[in-house]
Image: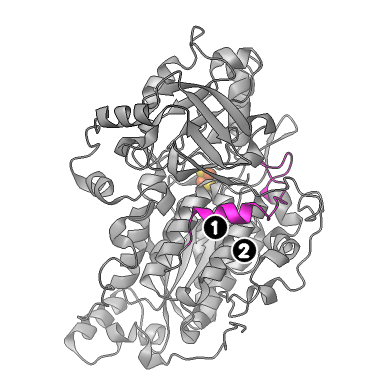
Amino acid sequence: MSQESSGKRVKTPESLRSARWFAPDDLRSFGHRSRAMQMGYGPEDWVGKPVIGIVNTWSDINPCHSHFKHRVEDVKRGVLQAGGFPIELPALSLAEQYVKPTTMLYRNLLAMDVEELLRCHPIDGVVLMGGCDKTTPALLMGATSAGLPSIYVPAGPMLRGNWHGKVLGSGSDAWKYWDDRRAGLINQKDWIEIEGGIARSHGTCMTMGTASTMTAIAEALGMTLPGASSIPAPDSNHLRMSAESGRRIVDMVWEDLTPNKIQTHAAFENAIAVAMAMGCSTNAIIHVIAQAKRAGCDIGLEDFDRFSRFVPVIANVRPSGDQYLMEDFFYAGGLPGLMTRIKQHLHLDTLTVTGKTLGENIEGAAVYNDDVIRPIDNPIYAEGALAVLKGNLAPDGCVIKPSACPPHLHRHTGPALVFDDYPSMKAVIDRDDLDVTADHVLILRNAGPQGGPGMPEWGMLPMPKKLLKQGVRDMLRMSDSRMSGTSYGACVLHISPESFVGGPLALVKTGDMISVDVPARTINLDISEEEFARRKAAWKAPEPKYERGYGWMFSKHIQQANEGCDFDFLRTDFGKAVPEPDIY
Ligand code: FES
């Protein structure tokens, strides 16, 4: 049965949530009205009009969202045009490049920020403005838990980078030229020019990193207007999409089109199919699992592995692709174009923010460049972007991105070279006397959700300088951390359970043989069960990282990577639903 929205008004002005604040003839509502008037508003602003919260993750230190300071005015324009009352609500900004130790430590804090902002204010519907990596899942997780009609406005990718006529891609080219510099192939002058050319405009990373992956997922879920996620940030289409989102959310309030009607199990399967076809960031797994669990949908690692076996990578965008960036992807037809190519793997009857189905939204969409968005029979990579491995080294699973690592490392056995933490690895990795060969398996532990803490993006361990000088550019690397979506290489990530809580990674010793077989989806440590048990019995838990504050709460309640790294107390099945405020 089609889940198409009736598009009918089911809400009346009296049944609006905000009417509880503004309508009653009592002292409390007097206070709400008089204070709104203090800001220059009058009854004509709020009587009978939905109040639209605009959660804006702009900040002076978030270059990916710098345009949101002004773009919010386009959203407000749309809200006003459609007869709503726009209210901007600033939220935690989470700039990927600046927040230390990692934005992942704060994804759930932003999700809580959003949920509580919406719950405690007189808001009827919300426009969510985000895009830089963790902001997309965080905003959607918070809005999903709040349960109000919600629409997502992605920040949009920045323009292509440029240096000496060469196209530069966020992250990917930084890693590449950094390795060249360490190998003595790039001088200081070139390096500074690359610094100035790699990020030419506001907007999110324009490779297929976590930002582009997660905004595409938001669109595939049905939480953005069609095509919204591909529009480059400086493009005038982005201003018009922002205004249109403002207009649309007003109608969504009247239609009572809440996230639970859009974010169904089928919608999450669409998100996974799209993620695979895009050659997505490995971070997508953690975020989508967390988002799905907030929506009450049972999505796990096995769903990603299942889709990865039959959905090919068709977006020829770096780092899985060899040439193009998100700007090219937009000109080639963007996400609606890509979705027409994988229609057979999508549930076309899922409902979206437009009130129409996904199938209706992509009707008439086209691809304008077959090299950027490949036909399904001429993919970049025949299988999906991600593979989930399990074995005695990762009983609860781990992840590798086969499309971004050389085929000869898809099956590999080699001796472990173990680093107990990031500083100890960094201290020796460039030493000429490091006992390492291209056959070694580099292992970094204590870099997971609790050990990092916050699972930093350390998973693309630097290649040892000694090997770089020999011309070796990739080797098998493993950790319980994550990897930037713009990174590449034979990196096994998210090993669960993590070493900090006693997962098997904690028991590996330098020289142990490790085997990875991507086609067979296995990862194993080659020691006897008796030796395994002996090491386990001798293992001592490390000291806790935090003894107070947010970090303490994080350590107590963070779940493992295979569960999406949400806080346990934010699960939908954790206790009774949060009541609406009953004192207005
Ligand atoms: Fe913001 Fe990459 S740093 S999207």
- Please state which amino acid type lies under the numbered disc 1: Asp
Circle on res. 517: none
Q: Secondary structure at mark 2?
A: helix
Find numbered disc 1 in the image and state the secondary structure of the residue it sits on.
helix
- Residue 71, relative to residue 362: is it above or below? above
Spot occupied by residue 570 in the image (x, y as percentages of width and height): 31, 61
Q: Earlier in the sequence, mark 1 or mark 2?
A: 2
Disc 2 residue: CB within 8 Å of ligand 1: no
Q: Is residue 184 above or below residue 515?
A: above
The residue stretch that appears in magenta: 299-326
Left or right, residue 335 beside residue 374: left
Residue 458 among those drawn in magenta: no
For mark 2, what is the residue?
A: 228
- Quadrant location of residue 112? bottom left
Q: Nearer the viewer, mark 1 or mark 2?
A: 1
Q: Quadrant of the C terminus?
A: bottom left
Q: Quadrant of residue 420?
A: top left
Q: Is residue 233 visible?
A: no
Q: Is residue 170 toward the left or the right of residue 432 in the image?
A: right
Residue 308 painted magenta: yes
Q: CA distance from mark 1 to mark 2?
A: 26 Å
Give the amino acid type for the residue marked by disc 2 in the picture: Ala
Circles 1 and 2 in contact, beta carbons < 8 Å: no
Q: Kindly tell me whether mark 1's CB lies below 8 Å from ligand 1.
A: no
Q: Residues within 10 Å of mark 1 (few under 14, many from 20)?
A: some
Where does the image place residue 154, in percent across and percent down from the top left?
55, 59
Instruction: Give the main secondary structure of the magenta stretch.
Output: loop
Left or right of 406 in this view: 96:
left
In this view, the residue in front, 288 or 228, is 288
